[in-house]
Amino acid sequence: MMRKPRRAAAMAALAAALMAGMCAFQAWAEPPQATALESAATASAAVSIKAFPAYQDAALLARAWALPVASRYKPLIEYQRNATFCGPTSLANVLHSWGQAADQSHLLEGTDVSTVLGYLPKGLTLDELADVARQKLGKSVTVMRGLDLAAFRQHMKRSNDPTRRYVINFSRQPLFGSGGGHHSPIAGYLTDEDLVLVLDVNSDFGPWLVKTDRLWAAMNTVDGRSNQLRGLLLIE
């Protein structure tokens, strides 16, 4: 007569374990052969970016939302339905920004990625997300890793190009002092302030602004699943 309670307890434990994945099941680590600048930027992560005035400054966010690409994201922002779905949700938002219908719940249909009880227990690596994007977006998708800071900044500047979309894979640890791997779209770049608008698909964070070097350091970390550096997806 104890089978049903035990089964319910087992299902609850499984769901809790899946939620603990927090979008990726990706360990944060120093990237191979980290440069002195990268190490310095990572060391500064002792102070969460939430402590900096620009993080969600209303006036700066208003200017950022007026940028060419950001303005296309703003009308319909979709947040991840659970802690493991940041990758599919990022791609759904990219599709929304191009005026196309999309739903994170169905985005993985017809791909090689399977869910367990609606979760992605191990999240998606950058390459896995790129494969899904190629199948579902009908666009050219380029995986970029190991960019130096100058090259990364140039890509951030080009995130304002309406023909391009970027999705970044980063670790929250160097930015907020805690957290694991995460995917979110880059919605724009404020040139004068050197600030990147990250459309965080986790509703607990919402969109935020960050200095380019700080975001670069968070991207230049190792995904414990793939044992490769995190990076950017360029979709065009």
Image: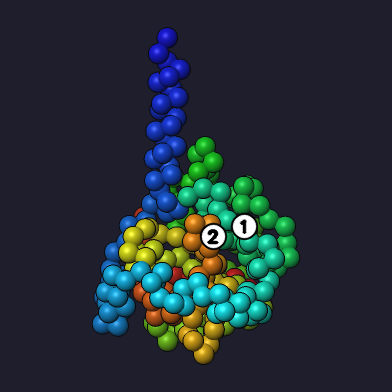
Identify the residue position indicated by label 2 in the image: 201
**For the point 43% across and 32% down, which residue is it?**
12
User: Mark 1 and 2 residues: CB-CB less than 8 Å, in contact?
Assistant: yes
Give the side of residue 101 with respect to residue 219, left or right: right
The x and y percentages for residue 221 are: 34, 68
User: Image quadrant of residue 222?
Assistant: bottom left
- For disc 1, the neighbor class at 10 Å (few under 14, some 14 to 19, many from 20) is many
As drawn, is 136 to the left or to the right of 83?
right
Residue visible at 39% across and 63% down in the picture: 172
Residue 139 is situated, as x and y percent measured from the top left of the image, at 65, 67
What's under tag 2, amino acid-wise?
Val
Residue at horizontal 37 percent and vertical 65 percent from the top: 176
Residue at mark 1 to residue at mark 2: CA–CA distance: 7 Å
Q: x, y percentage for residue 92?
A: 63, 58
What is the three-letter code of the residue carrying label 1?
Answer: Glu
Q: Position of residue 212 (x, y in %)?
A: 44, 80
Q: In which quarter of the image is the N terminus?
A: top left
Looking at the image, residue 229 lies above or below residue 26: below
